[in-house]
Image (cartoon, grey):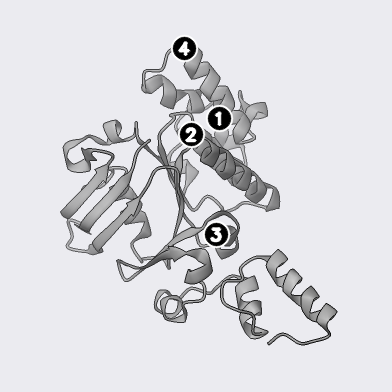
């Protein structure tokens, strides 16, 4: 499996805009990581540096032993798969099966493996029944799963999901959760950009917070959402459970409904009040 390492990385666009500054972090293989922050914080630029779509102006991005400056985007895609925020920026076939097959076929997989991994990826993403459909005849939320399947089918060690929860209903969010769990079983690294704090607390332990083009926090979710200075600088609101827990005086670290309910039950049984 492949480790990802950013060493003092900065990137400036040709027009002189500084997009990210002095990013340093290490993501070991098999970890789930959520990157959060407001629009303009530098999140998308950061992940595009990770998969070689952008090359650092200064610093170094290592994908395993590869320096992204010395490899093409196509080469890096064998190790880092990237699902765009907008599926319409990624889909270019008029049939779902062809879209999902393109990646593994282009990677040089033999026909047997291509067929096997294509069918598996479509099943995992809940789109098997749409194999012969035109993706552009599908709802936005389903097209998102087409693009996710097409990247998963490439069998990259690292998978980046840019705003996967956008446009998803409860069923779609549950499917995403199942998908993340399955990828973890396979030892895949999953890096997700999202504005959905509830989704973050349910599915990610490690959180990277970005603000003003920098990483301002890198910690467990249970710590991040109780660091008020970090939340203030990044202009993020903690998830509902954390806000409620703070209001009633629970200890820091409560992020899940079950934890909140258990605490309240204990208080009722003791005949006391939340301290």
Q: Earlier in the sequence, mark 1 or mark 4?
A: 4
Between discs 2 and 4, the one toward the N terminus: 4
Decide if residue 194 is in sight here.
yes
Label 4 Cα crowd, 10 Å radius (few <14 / some 14-19 / many 20+): few
- Secondary structure under badge 4? helix
Mark 1 to mark 4 CA distance (whole Å): 15 Å
Mark 1 and mark 3: Cα distance apart in space: 23 Å
Quadrant for residue 247, please give it. Answer: bottom right
Does residue 198 sit above or below 107 in this rendering? Answer: below
Would you name the residue on which mark 1 appears?
121
Q: Earlier in the sequence, mark 3 or mark 2?
A: 2
Q: Which of marks 1 and 3 is in front?
A: 3
Q: Distance between the residues labelled 2 and 1?
A: 6 Å
Residue at the image point whose x is 60% and y is 58% from the top: 202
Left or right of 77? Residue 8 is: left
Tag 4 residue: 111
| Percent coordinates x, y for residue 29 in the rendering | 40, 43
- Quadrant assignment for the C terminus: bottom right
- The answer to whether residue 12 shows anywhere in this view is no
| Residue carrying label 2 | 152
Q: Mark 3 points at which residue?
A: 200
* Element class at badge 3: helix
The residue located at (72%, 85%) in the rendering is: 274
């Amino acid at each position: 499996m492949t480790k990802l390492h950013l060493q003092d990385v900065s990137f400036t666009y040709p027009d002189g805009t500084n997009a990210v500054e002095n990013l340093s972090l290490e993501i070991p293989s098999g970890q789930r990581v959520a990157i959060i922050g407001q629009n303009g914080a530098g999140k998308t630029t950061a992940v595009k540096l990770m998969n070689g779509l952008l090359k650092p102006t200064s610093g170094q991005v290592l994908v395993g032993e590869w320096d992204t400056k010395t490899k093409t985007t196509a080469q890096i895609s064998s190790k880092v798969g990237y699902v765009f925020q907008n599926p319409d920026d990624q889909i270019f076939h008029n049939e779902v099966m062809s879209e999902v097959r393109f990646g593994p076929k282009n990677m040089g997989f033999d026909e047997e493996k291509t067929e096997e991994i294509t069918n598996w990826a479509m099943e995992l993403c809940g789109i098997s029944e749409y194999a012969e459909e035109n993706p552009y005849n599908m709802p936005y939320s389903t097209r998102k799963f087409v693009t996710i399947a097409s990247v998963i089918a490439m069998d990259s060690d690292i998978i980046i999901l840019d705003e996967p929860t956008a446009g998803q209903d409860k069923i779609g969010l549950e499917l995403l959760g199942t998908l993340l769990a399955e990828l973890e079983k396979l030892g895949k690294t999953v890096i997700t950009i999202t504005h959905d704090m509830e989704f973050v607390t349910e599915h990610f332990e490690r959180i990277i917070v970005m603000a003003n083009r920098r990483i301002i926090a890198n910690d467990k979710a249970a710590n991040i959402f109780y660091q008020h200075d970090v939340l203030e600088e990044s202009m993020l609101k903690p998830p509902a459970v954390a806000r409620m827990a703070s209001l009633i005086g629970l200890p820091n670290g409560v992020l899940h409904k079950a934890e909140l309910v258990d605490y309240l039950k204990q208080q009722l049984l003791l005949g006391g009040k939340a301290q």
